[in-house]
Image (cartoon, rainbow, N blue to C red):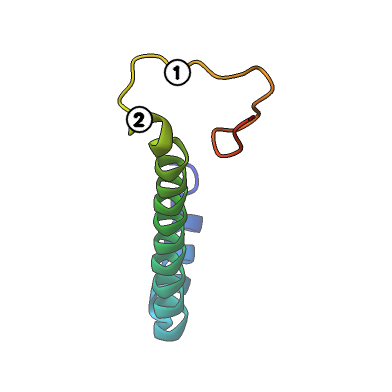
Amino acid sequence: MKYSGIMRIGFKLLVNDRAKFSALLIGITFSVFLMVQMTAMFAGILNRAYSTVTNIGATMRIMDPAVNTPTSPFP
């Protein structure tokens, strides 16, 4: 490998300093937690957004053309 010396020096600089290494591990752990949390929140929002359509149980719904959303019916 061409960069084996540079990689070895970089690894020693990272691992030999306990504070830097622990801060790196905490930062990576926190960022992974945030990514998983935001993905789960997005999936939950999408699940709630289409739940009114899926919970109706009808095979077909016919609405007036003036109705924009199911929550605001046209009289």
Asked if residue 14 lies left or right of residue 69, the reply is: left
Q: Which residue is mark 2?
A: 56
As drawn, the residue found furthest toward the right would be 66
Q: Quadrant where the N terminus lies? A: top left
Pointer 2 with pointer 1, Cβ within 8 A: yes
**SS of the residue under disc 1:** loop
Of the residues shown, which amino acid type is indicated by label 1?
Answer: Arg
Disc number placed over residue 61 in the picture, else none = 1
Q: State which quadrant residue 73 falls in.
A: top right
Q: Residue at x 44, y 53 (%)?
A: 41
Q: Position of residue 23 (x, y in %)?
A: 45, 78
| Side of 66 where 4 appears, left or right | left
Residue 66, above or below 50: above
Q: Nearer the viewer, residue 16 or 36?
A: 36
Q: Position of residue 57 (x, y in %)?
A: 30, 26
Q: Residue at x 47, y 63 (%)?
A: 31
Which quarter of the rendered picture does the C terminus lie within?
top right
Decide: few, some or many residues near mark 1? Use Cα within 10 Å; few <14, some 14-19, many ≥20. Answer: few
* Residue 53 point in image, percent of width and height: 42, 30
Count of numbered marks? 2
Give the camera-side residue of 7 and 48.
48
Q: Is residue 22 above or below residue 33?
A: below
